[in-house]
């Protein structure tokens, strides 16, 4: 039985959603970053963490890809051109969407107040909007990599949802409609009902 460590309203949601998509049971330990509970699994206190037997894994995207590879689902096979294209999309999403959202969070509430630079947030929001436009232009099928849902779909949807919660401008209609269909997936809804 897997154990996911982290609050539902954090990057832990990505891992929970992945497990729901895979149809794999898991326990959920709801806790915030840098909490005593989180530090039991990751000395830095960062969430999420995944307990798989005696192994403790960290970083939401690494965990998602590990689970996809282990269960042979929601991913192209390793060592194939399709996987290289999928990895390229994943890394692009981390660089161009997730990192921007995280930088905004750091300058909103993560950093001590004296280290925050609120003026940077408008620039970050503009950068995110450019990336969302690019993503919309790249979306050609029902999913980012074509006809099958993969890790990047979950990651991109989570980033879009995060941007909504952070008060960013809405993504365009095409990307917004796609993200809505992703949120309507039963696995997304199941993960969303877990304890905060």
Image (tube, rainbow, N blue to C red):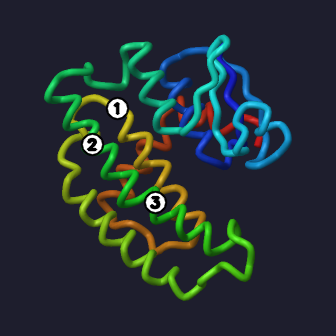
**Which element type, helix, strand or loop, lies under badge 3?**
helix
Earlier sequence position, callout 3 versus callout 2: 3
Determine whether label 1 and label 2 are within 8 Å by CB.
yes
Read off the residue under disc 1. 150
Using the image, tell me which numbered label, if any, was put on residue 26: none
Please determine whether, in this image, residue 108 is positioned above or below residue 60.
below
* Residue 87 placement, left or right of 138: right
Q: Residue at x 33, y 57 (%)?
A: 175
The mark total stands at: 3
Using the image, tell me which numbered label, if any, was put on residue 99: 3
Read off the residue under disc 2. 144
Category of crowding for the residue at label 3, using alpha-carbon neighbours closer than 10 angstroms: few (below 14), some (14–19), many (at least 20): some
**Dot in front, 3 or 2:** 3
Where residue 4 sits: x, y (%)? 67, 28
**Dot in front, 3 or 1:** 3
Determine whether label 3 and label 2 are within 8 Å by CB.
no
* Residue sitting farthest toward the right: 36
**Which element type, helix, strand or loop, lies under badge 2?**
loop
* Residue 132 placement, left or right of 30: left
Earlier sequence position, callout 3 versus callout 1: 3
Quadrant showing the N terminus: top right
**Which element type, helix, strand or loop, lies under badge 1?**
loop
Q: Disc 3 versus disc 1: distance between alpha carbons? A: 20 Å
Category of crowding for the residue at label 2, using alpha-carbon neighbours closer than 10 angstroms: few (below 14), some (14–19), many (at least 20): many
Where residue 23 sits: x, y (%)? 53, 16
Q: Nearer the viewer, residue 152 or 20?
A: 152
Q: Disc 1 versus disc 2: distance between alpha carbons? A: 8 Å
Where residue 40 sits: x, y (%)? 79, 32
* Residue sitting farthest toward the left: 81
Q: Nearer the viewer, residue 102 or 146?
A: 102
């Amino acid at each position: 039985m897997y154990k996911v460590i982290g609050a539902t309203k954090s990057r832990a949601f990505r891992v929970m959603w992945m497990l729901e998509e895979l149809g794999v049971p898991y326990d959920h330990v709801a806790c915030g970053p840098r909490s005593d509970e989180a530090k039991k699994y990751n000395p830095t206190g960062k969430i999420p963490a995944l307990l798989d037997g005696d192994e403790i894994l960290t970083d939401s995207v690494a965990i998602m890809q590990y689970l996809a590879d282990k269960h042979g689902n929601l991913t192209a096979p390793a060592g194939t051109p399709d996987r290289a294209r999928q990895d390229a999309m994943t890394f692009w999403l981390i660089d161009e969407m997730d990192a921007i959202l995280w930088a905004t969070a750091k300058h909103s509430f993560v950093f001590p107040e004296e280290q925050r630079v609120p003026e940077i947030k408008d620039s970050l929001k503009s950068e995110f909007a450019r990336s969302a436009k690019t993503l919309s232009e790249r979306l050609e099928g029902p999913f980012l990599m074509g006809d099958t849902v993969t890790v990047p779909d979950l990651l991109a949807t989570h980033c879009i949802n995060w941007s909504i919660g952070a008060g960013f401008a809405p993504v365009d209609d095409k990307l917004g409609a796609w993200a809505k269909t992703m949120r309507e997936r039963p696995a997304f809804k199941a993960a969303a009902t877990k304890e905060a």
